[in-house]
Amino acid sequence: IYVGEIHGTSENNSDIRRITPAGEVTTVPGSIIIPMSGEEIRVPAGLTVTPAGDIYYVHGASGYVQGVSRVSGGVLSLLAGRYSFEDLKDGLGSAAEFACPKAIQHKGSYFYVADASNGALRRVSSAGNVITLAGVGHFQTNRFFGGGAFRPPIEGSYRLPIIVTSPDIHEIAAAAIRMDQPGGITMPPD
């Protein structure tokens, strides 16, 4: 079992801990973060482990790292996202932007991220390329839509039209799906 942890004399120090079936607890090499500035704070909010044993996690605290980090071979790196910047933008690596992602799940060669404040489901490739599968962005979520008045979630389904009128029809369809603060992901087994 892997657990993201905030510890130490500052609430901003964090690491990832491994717990064996025998109850032995160890710190994952390379996962310890003792930030030198606010831009380096990485609060683990969701974790996933690949079959190769690499750990990927998202950061769910506002104002700090917004994206997906990787711990591989004892080295920590930012796969996708930016420091201290919250928005909904697709792109590669630091060109992509997130807003308080809360959960991550690995399946096949992709990572799926519940990007909470954006009300979005995002897909991240192992190279760090991010696309939005569903969602509208922070200020268009139900929580903020309409001048801050809370609106309930929208239920239903969306069907693509038989006649495709735009080459961007899938992106348009994804933007029509409105979620509010998604916070968990699970996938059926392969």
Image (tube, rainbow, N blue to C red):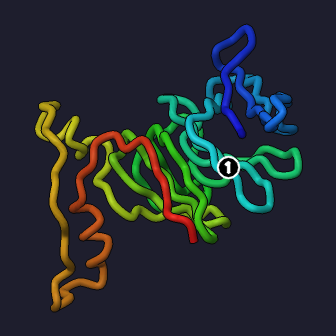
Q: Position of residue 181 (x, y in %)?
A: 34, 40
Most distant residue in the bottom direction: 163
For the residue pair 136 and 85, the one nearer the viewer reads as: 136
Residue at 45% x, 45% y is 184
The image shows residue 6, relative to residue 156, as above or below, that is above
> Would you say residue 112 is visible in this rendering?
yes
Q: Is any atom of residue 92 visible in this view?
A: no
- Compared to residue 182, the image places residue 113 above or below, namely below
Horizontal arrangement in the rendering, residue 119 relative to residue 68 (left or right): left
In this view of the protein, which residue sits in the foreground, 81 or 174? 174
Task: Choose between 99 and 17: the one closer to the eye.
Answer: 17
Residue 71 lies, in percent from the top left, at 77, 47
The image quarter containing residue 125 is bottom right
At numbered mark 1, what does the secondary structure look like: helix, strand or loop?
strand
The residue drawn where x is 31% and y is 55% is 135
Query: What residue is disc 1 on?
Result: 56
Q: Is residue 145 left or right of residue 115?
A: left
Image: 185 above or below 35: below
Q: Is residue 179 left or right of residue 97?
A: left
Q: Quadrant of the N terminus?
A: top right
